[in-house]
Image (tube, rainbow, N blue to C red):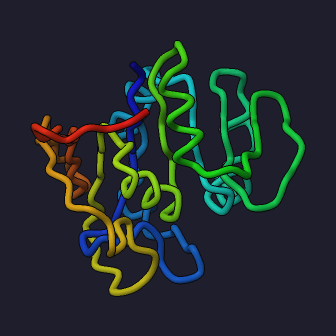
Amino acid sequence: MRKLSLFIATSLDGYIAKPNDDLEFLKLVEKEGEDYGYMEFISTVDTIIIGRKTYDYVVKAIGSEHYDNGKHDVYVITRTPRPSSGRTTFYTGHPADLVRDLKTRDGQNIYCDGGAEVVNELVKQDLVDEMTISIIPILLGEGVRLFQDHRPEQQLELIKTKSFDTGLVQLHYKRKLLAGRHFSI
């Protein structure tokens, strides 16, 4: 069965964006030739799930070819129906239903690229199998939290840590399945 993974950056105090969805703080760790393992990670997936606000931000900042490159099926979680474009589908259903369906299909792994609403719904539904979280060396004090309150407790198993000379620290966890706990797909 395919697994769903996060590969996401956060401030040391747990924010993935400043107020008004500002991601400028990520530039603190930009370094020529350093992708923090992103290319290796993205080569293991063929499907990307992303919230509409994050999708719009990335398309504006980098360009539509970042997602619409013919390499991945992309599902943009949105409340407003839009026509599909290439391999990009604007999905108006519940993200958990989409992930449950995708996990039963053949293919490589699935990548959740954010945003916070989508991540938290998938965590709440216990559908995230692995998390690679890059900690940016900054305390933002406010903004959009990576993990929100009111979700079930989940135990994780540390797979790997890596530190970089930019001060970024990367943590790779997998979900620890507890005995007696059953999940329906």
- Is 152 rendered above or below residue 83? below
Q: Quadrant of residue 86?
A: top right
Q: Residue at x 56, y 30 (%)?
A: 101
Q: Position of residue 6 (x, y in %)?
A: 39, 44
Q: Position of residue 37 (x, y in %)?
A: 34, 34
Q: Residue at x 52, y 38 (%)?
A: 99
Q: Position of residue 26 (x, y in %)?
A: 43, 62
The single residue placed furthest to the right in the displayed view is 83
139 sits to left or right of 8 = left
Numbered circles on residues, count: 0
153 sits to left or right of 76 = left
Query: In this orientation, which residue lies closer to the viewer: 6 or 25?
Result: 6
- Is 67 rendered above or below residue 114? above
Q: Position of residue 170 (x, y in %)?
A: 23, 48
Pick the quarter of the image with the N terminus.
Answer: top left
The single residue placed furthest to the bottom in the displayed view is 141
Pick the quarter of the image with the C terminus.
Answer: top left
181 sits to left or right of 122 = left
Query: In this orientation, which residue lies closer to the viewer: 47 or 81?
Result: 81
Q: Residue at x 43, y 43 (%)?
A: 32
88 sits to left or right of 104 = right
